[in-house]
């Protein structure tokens, strides 16, 4: 029998208690004296949250193991405080079959660092035409309930409607990358606005996101199915989502740490590290996202962790790959931006980074309250530590890290997966 | 390591622009000498690294370098290593590793020269980056207009055409404004850069979609921009005919313009689509400075190369 005693952690940032985890399950919460063989973590001053869940990461395996593997991505996740991540389907080959999904599940399990839940493609090959084997992926050992063509938008309204209807049988959900490619075409590489006009860069107007969000909200209403809006980036998208929720529609939404904190003016130096899809927006949009995250209109934080090999980023801005790292810095960004500023409590962070994403993605072993009987998945946070991000220390294989050099208040102290410490102090345990 | 670049007109202030234009005037005289060589850049190597086709810009940089006694090498990266998957960084570093003093870069991507300047030690001159800037074009336009009109302070200049896809307009806007000119940009809304209204408010220039109204208000110069063929089918405007009637420098507009102001200057950075944005009558009018612009190109580029490379002081330059 393995025992772990977390001594004196503030549960969700409130009262301190001891947490005893035995055989991967929380056995007791309160004032606990350590069994003789227990590993003890002195958590005085630390905040304990249920293990963090990231519903949106790109792990690049299979196909681009030079940028990230499931093992390196899992290591970055563990260091970042995560006990579960959902791996997007846009690998090579695409995760559009039961076999592909099970392979990712198994590679994730082999890491022992984090549960890797495969996300299934909505359409075969992400081509937007034929439905992928949604039902077979759900029936597989991977139990896929979350589907996405992320990286691409499910453009065809008829395909989106059919997919939503089809997955209702098993209460699936589609995470939509909302981008009308007629309004934001293949060259679009940054927010369309005054700066893109000055820089001469082809822009991606907010309306290219909002029209798709609006359409999908209406399809959610029509089908009664669940739609999740990935990486919301504009204030107007938020208004549409707010309306949908007021109507009682089953629409959820996520914001990334980078859309919450970073803004389009960073592009002035044409550094491709800031090139991401959807693009960084102006401060007004970032502020609207922060407000919406605090008031619950945005349900969750997800990183859209998108590693890229250096040789895919070291191009002219329009030619460089889209995406940035996020797993190791997500908690620190939210802590710095939302908790240290008093806009959210640690209980709110537990909701947006653990409970809600686990619920949306259908991960039953995650996002559970810290109480007797729950799986022993915990993230311990030092709320007062200020850490300066060093890209070179990353566990990711890639270095496209927009956070490098930033000092953020709040750091992951330790990550615990089913009673085993996976990471501590920025390194694997 | 000190770096000296001309990436954007924002890299030079008004005084530096005036200095470049004054030196260009001296260089211009060299063009009319029998022996055109100056020894200023002897022993210096200038590489024209062109990722995009260009005739006039590349050749005028080449002549400018040669008349200053620099060794000038042309590398056409189009269809060479770049298309074989070599990154921009590798291409630039490979060329820089040969020990060049200045890299003159033309690239189809906005910001390319800016990025290259961060990777290498040689001086970088932006010879056109995507739809961003073309600073030496703006300098030669200012030079040409200044020779025609004298000081440009208070002069009203209309720039007309495809503003969205023009690197010339961005550099000209910055340059003419710094020299005190009043600039009005004219185009159908579909051919205006995004966010132009707040940009105009911040920088103090005007924007209009009514060419006749702008011309009737009185102008000292009109700069007509090329409308690229590929835009015509892009839904930016209905038909070439409609564009010409709305925004072309047609014969009737030319007549009205000259009647109102015989000293008006007509510019076009070339290559011209005669009959589309500019009529042949306007292109060849006595008021047309189109060929003066070409001739000024060499002098201005000599001046830029001179100012960036000839000084013995390593910290002299225009951009950090």
Image: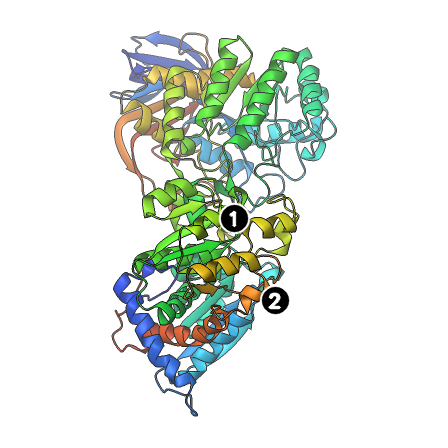
Camera-side residue of A371 and A321: A321
Q: Is residue B154 visible?
A: yes
- Residue at 33% from the left image edge and 18% from the top image edge: A346
Instruction: Give the number of the mark in front: 2 or 1.
Output: 2
Query: Residues at marks 2 and 1, common chain?
Result: no
Eyeballing the image, is A331 above or below A272?
above
Question: Label 2: how many residues lie within 10 Å, few (<14), some (14-19) or many (20+)?
Answer: few
Residue B37 position in % (x across, y down)? 41, 88
Residue A212 position in % (x across, y down)? 58, 26
Camera-side residue of A26 and A317: A317
Judge left or right: residue B102 versus residue B236.
left
- Residue at 25% from the left image edge and 75% from the top image edge: B313
Judge left or right: residue A419 versus residue B84.
left
How did the renderer colour the structure? rainbow
Residue A61 position in % (x across, y down)? 59, 38
Mark 1: which secondary structure?
A: loop
Quadrant of the drawing holding the N terminus of chain B: bottom left
**Residue on which the image places disc 2:** B80
**Residue on which the image places disc 1:** A309
Which numbered tag is attached to residue A413? none
Tell me the subunit letter for badge 1.
Answer: A
Eyeballing the image, is B158 above or below A16?
below
Q: Residue furthest front?
A: B259
Camera-side residue of A325 and A185: A185
Judge left or right: residue A98 versus residue A285.
right
């Amino acid at each position: 029998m393995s025992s772990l005693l977390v001594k004196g952690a503030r549960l969700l940032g409130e009262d301190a208690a001891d947490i005893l985890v035995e055989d991967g399950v929380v056995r007791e919460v309160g004032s606990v004296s350590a069994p003789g063989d227990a590993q003890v973590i002195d958590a005085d001053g630390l905040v304990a949250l249920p293990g963090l869940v990231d519903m949106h990461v790109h792990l690049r395996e299979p196909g681009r193991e030079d940028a990230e593997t499931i093992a390196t991505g899992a290591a970055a996740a563990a260091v970042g405080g995560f006990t579960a991540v959902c791996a997007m389907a846009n690998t090579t080959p695409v995760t559009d079959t039961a076999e592909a999904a099970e392979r990712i599940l198994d590679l994730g399990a082999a890491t022992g660092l984090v549960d890797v839940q495969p996300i299934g493609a909505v359409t075969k090959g992400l081509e937007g035409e034929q439905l992928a084997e949604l039902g077979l992926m759900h029936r597989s050992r991977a139990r896929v309930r979350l589907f996405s063509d992320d990286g691409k938008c499910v453009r065809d309204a008829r395909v989106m409607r059919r997919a939503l209807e089809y997955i209702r049988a098993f209460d699936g959900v589609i995470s939509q990358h909302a981008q009308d490619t007629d309004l934001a075409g293949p060259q679009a590489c940054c927010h369309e606005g005054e700066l893109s006009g000055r820089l001469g860069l082809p822009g991606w107007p907010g309306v290219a996101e909002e029209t798709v969000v609006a359409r999908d909200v209406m399809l959610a209403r029509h089908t009664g199915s669940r739609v999740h809006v990935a990486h919301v980036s504009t204030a107007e998208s938020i208004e549409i989502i707010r309306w949908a929720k007021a109507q009682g529609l089953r629409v959820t939404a996520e914001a990334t740490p980078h859309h919450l904190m970073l803004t389009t003016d960073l592009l002035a130096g044409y550094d491709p590290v800031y090139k991401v899809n959807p693009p960084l927006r102006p401060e007004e949009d970032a502020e609207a996202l922060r407000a919406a995250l605090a008031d619950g209109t945005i349900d969750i934080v997800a990183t859209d962790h998108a590693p890229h090999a250096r040789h895919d980023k070291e191009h002219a801005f329009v030619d460089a790959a889209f995406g940035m790292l996020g797993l190791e810095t997500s908690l620190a960004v939210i802590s710095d931006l939302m908790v240290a500023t008093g806009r959210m409590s640690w209980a709110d962070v537990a909701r947006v980074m653990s409970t809600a994403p686990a619920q949306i993605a259908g991960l039953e072993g995650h996002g559970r309250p810290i109480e007797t009987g729950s799986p022993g998945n915990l993230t311990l946070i030092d709320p007062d530590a200020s850490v300066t991000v060093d890209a070179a220390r990353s566990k990711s294989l890639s270095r496209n890290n927009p956070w490098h050099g930033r000092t953020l208040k709040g750091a992951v102290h330790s990550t615990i997966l089913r009673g085993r410490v996976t990471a501590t102090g920025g390194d694997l345990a | 390591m000190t770096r000296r670049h001309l990436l954007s007109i924002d890299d030079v202030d008004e005084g530096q622009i005036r200095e470049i234009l004054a030196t260009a005037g001296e260089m211009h005289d060299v063009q009319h000498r029998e022996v055109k060589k100056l020894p200023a850049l002897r022993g210096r190597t200038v590489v024209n690294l062109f990722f995009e086709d260009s005739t006039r810009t590349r050749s005028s940089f080449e002549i400018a370098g040669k008349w200053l006694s620099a060794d000038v090498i042309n590398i056409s990266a189009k269809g060479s290593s770049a298309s074989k998957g070599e990154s921009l960084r590798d291409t630039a570093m490979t060329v820089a590793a040969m020990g060049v003093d200045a890299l003159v870069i033309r690239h189809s991507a906005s910001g390319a020269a800016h990025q290259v300047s961060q990777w290498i030690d040689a001086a970088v001159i932006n010879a056109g980056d995507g739809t961003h800037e073309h600073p030496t074009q703006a300098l030669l336009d200012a030079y040409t207009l200044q020779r025609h009109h004298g000081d440009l302070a208070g002069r009203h200049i209309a720039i007309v055409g495809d503003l969205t896809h023009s690197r010339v307009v961005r550099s000209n806007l910055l340059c003419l404004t710094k020299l005190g000119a009043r600039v009005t940009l004219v185009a159908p809304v579909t051919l205006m850069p995004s966010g132009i209204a707040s940009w105009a408010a911040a920088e103090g220039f005007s924007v209009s979609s009514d060419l006749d109204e702008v011309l009737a208000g009185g102008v000292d110069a009109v700069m007509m921009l090329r409308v690229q063929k590929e835009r015509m089918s892009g839904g930016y405007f209905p038909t070439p005919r409609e564009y010409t009637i709305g925004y072309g420098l047609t014969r009737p507009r030319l007549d009205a313009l000259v009647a109102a102001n015989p000293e008006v200057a007509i510019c076009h950075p070339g290559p011209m689509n005669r009959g589309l944005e500019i009529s042949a009558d306007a292109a060849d009018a006595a008021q047309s400075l189109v060929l003066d612009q070409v001739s000024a190109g060499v002098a201005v580029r000599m001046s830029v190369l001179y100012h960036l490379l000839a000084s013995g002081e390593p910290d002299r330059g225009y951009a950090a």
